[in-house]
Image: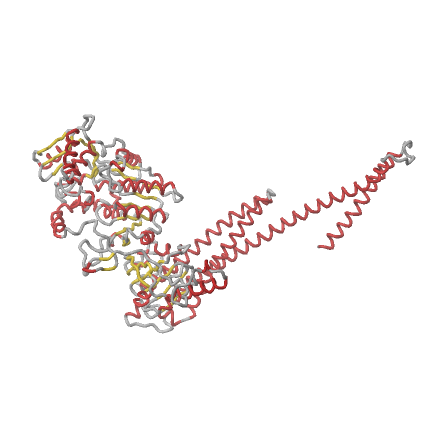
Amino acid sequence: MRIAIAGGLGLGYLLATGLSRAENAYNVVVLSRTPRKLTWNANTKPRREFAAFGIQVHVVDYHNKDTLRFALNGIDLVISTISGQEQLNLINAAGHGRVRYFVPSEFEGSLEKRPPAHSDPLDRGSAAALALLRQWSEGSTRMKWTVFSCGVFMERFHPYGLTASLGIGAGEGVGTVGSYVADINAGYADYTAKDAKNSSVKICLTSVIDVVRFVIAAVDLGPSNWPAEFTMRGDKKSLRDVVDALSAAQNIAFDSQVLSYQELLTHIAYNTQMAQYARVAYLQRNLQTANGRYEFSRTNLNDAVDRSSRVSVRPMNFAQWLATIFRSCTSYQTQPAIDPGRKLPEMAQNVRCVVKSASILAKCRQASAHQTWRGNLRTSASGPGGRRAPVSPPHRLYNTSAPAPDGSTSPSSSSSSSSSSSVVERAVRLSMAPLNGSVKMQCTRCDADGAATTTTLSKAEVASEYGLSPRDLQVVDVPSQGFPHILVRESTILVHVFDLRLLIQADRILLLHVDGLADTTISQVFTYDLQNKLRGDGSHVLHRKLGEAFELRALEAALASVAAGLEALYLGARRDVGLALRRLDEQMAGREEESVHTALRELLDMARRLADIEQRARLVRNALQELLREDQDMADLYLTDKRDGRRHAAAEHEEVEYLFESYFRAHDAVVHEAAALMANVHRTDDTIRSILANRRNQIMILETKVEIAMLAMATATLVAGWYGMNTVNFLEQSGYAFAVIVSGSVLGGGMIWMFLLRRLRNIRRKKF
């Protein structure tokens, strides 16, 4: 399963590293706003904290739907740790990208305890996200979604706060110490102990580490059976017990201000009137707690984990968690919250050790208060003053109007009254569009480590940066499959195969995205698990040997994607053809001619599909054959050696030749297999049509024989009819007249019938 984590800090980091090191070792992709550290400047190096875990990082702009859809290619499950409009854009991109499962950033109280959106003071876009998820789940994509409700994070009571300890909660106002119920450092508590019914207010608490473990366990159990909401908890306590536990942990008596429910409502109204909005926000959190927002009795995820023999999660209770906070990292001896095979204890220890350096982190945060964990969007272009300008969606700037004599543009072809004029105008537009160097294209850069960055470049900028001629890029942005070709230039390899448009250099690649393509299968296959394909560490099946040059790995990944895409199309067509032929045999055996005609139309469509597959495979095979004929072009493919001053001679291209020969044979096999299957379809079609024609001929012969019999009978009975008329024929008194006439009629009709059948037999004999 391929999992995308939206957000690479705090909870997102823990989820990503935990899933990548889980027993099943999931393929994890992190969607990050920026590949750089928190404090950005021109000298900062890219973040490498995910490299040790084998996690691929995609830099995305959550307000750019194209970059989001590209990043979600091939993703099965998305787990979001972001909120607001960014999460809504992510949900839409996931729905359009055919993501099967989505987990929104809703790690708090149970859904049934939340008030409606219009009256929820704590809503930060949650209701809108859930409504959008319901729309996608009911649409054609049927994207399933699940909310993980955990109550209150225990880390809200951390001595350094939720944000300083784990980088969570800064945008929700609960990240600082004392932002909820109690300030453990000051020994002060402010809460409501009784609800409106005078019952004790209770909350469910779960450690962030245990939330991560529960999510991993749920993924191990399989998302296909997930309900709309998973509830979990590590402990359940009344607010008074929580404050007592904090007091005991600090060994001091807390100064508590306990408000009744009515007093709480009065304080909210008063502070609202006095414009004390920070105090109002604190009291609103207390009010929602008193209304039971964070209390639930049934924990279906705890129950599912307990019933399963495959996973094991033993969450910490509040007392155990407090013990870990006030105990040093080296003396921590609490029971593991998950089985040893999970490979998560190291991660949990790292998080616990953050406590030791949290004060340093807090000072750093104060020194750079303008930077937050959730930060501003990072983009690829720098604006004035070192600030980065936002990336706007790509716009096609084709010169799509024919020039008029006065310099203005001519009307569109649809308004032209002359068809020849329309053709001329369309031809002028098509001829001028590739010459426009200002056309903007959405691009993705990938370095040798697989780190991806999305940017926008014009055709002129691409040609200048990669040492290409503008003519090489004439059709690279045309929204059609195009003619497959591979161009070898001094420092760049241009790969244009159907929807895959790729520039390869010795240490990087540039993937071009084209709007309006009906089929992007090859591009999606190429970008799937791109990091492992480009690393060259021997871990991927594409790498035949260690140390292979980067450009050859990238080229092989592209050719493998094309071959895999065509092979998948062929296998799908072969399966459909097999099913159609079996249905056709059953219908022929049952003599259901009407259904047979429907099956023949299906076979015709499949023959067209096979012809398209054969043509595409043939085009790629011919492109590879052209390169195999050019020794110098194959030698020039060694860009790394050329950059290092080791230019290959025309005959020194054995490795590249083996590479091209391998994929030449692969595409040649697809050509022959598709042609053979198409020939089988045509033979079956001809055979069935012959059988149906023979059946129709038999029916026509039967109809002719019936008509001949009726003619013979009519002719014979005509004479009898004449004798039956009211005319005097002097036979009325004869005793033998009736028998003679009937016998004569039958004998005459039989003779006529035999004569006509002989004539029909002679006609058929002459025809065949």
**Quarter of the rendering containing residue 195:** top left
Q: Is residue 46 left or right of residue 100?
A: left
**Quarter of the rendering containing residue 502:** bottom left
Q: Is residue 331 left or right of residue 29?
A: left
Q: How is the image coloured?
A: secondary structure
Q: Is residue 413 above or below residue 289?
A: below
Q: Residue furthest left?
A: 252
Residue 164, percent across and down? 15, 46
Q: Is residue 44 left or right of residue 6?
A: left
Q: In this rendering, does residue 661 appear at all?
A: no
How many marks overall?
A: 0
Q: Nearer the viewer, residue 541 or 370?
A: 370
Q: In this rendering, does residue 172 appear at all?
A: yes
Residue 677, percent across and down? 52, 55
Q: Residue furthest bottom?
A: 649
Q: Nearer the viewer, residue 166 or 548?
A: 166
Q: Is residue 733 above or below residue 604?
A: above
Which quadrant of the figure contains the C terminus? bottom right
Q: Is residue 715 left or right of residue 200?
A: right
Q: Nearer the viewer, residue 53 or 203?
A: 203
Q: Residue furthest front?
A: 406
Residue 685, percent across and down? 58, 52
Q: Nearer the viewer, residue 93 or 450?
A: 93
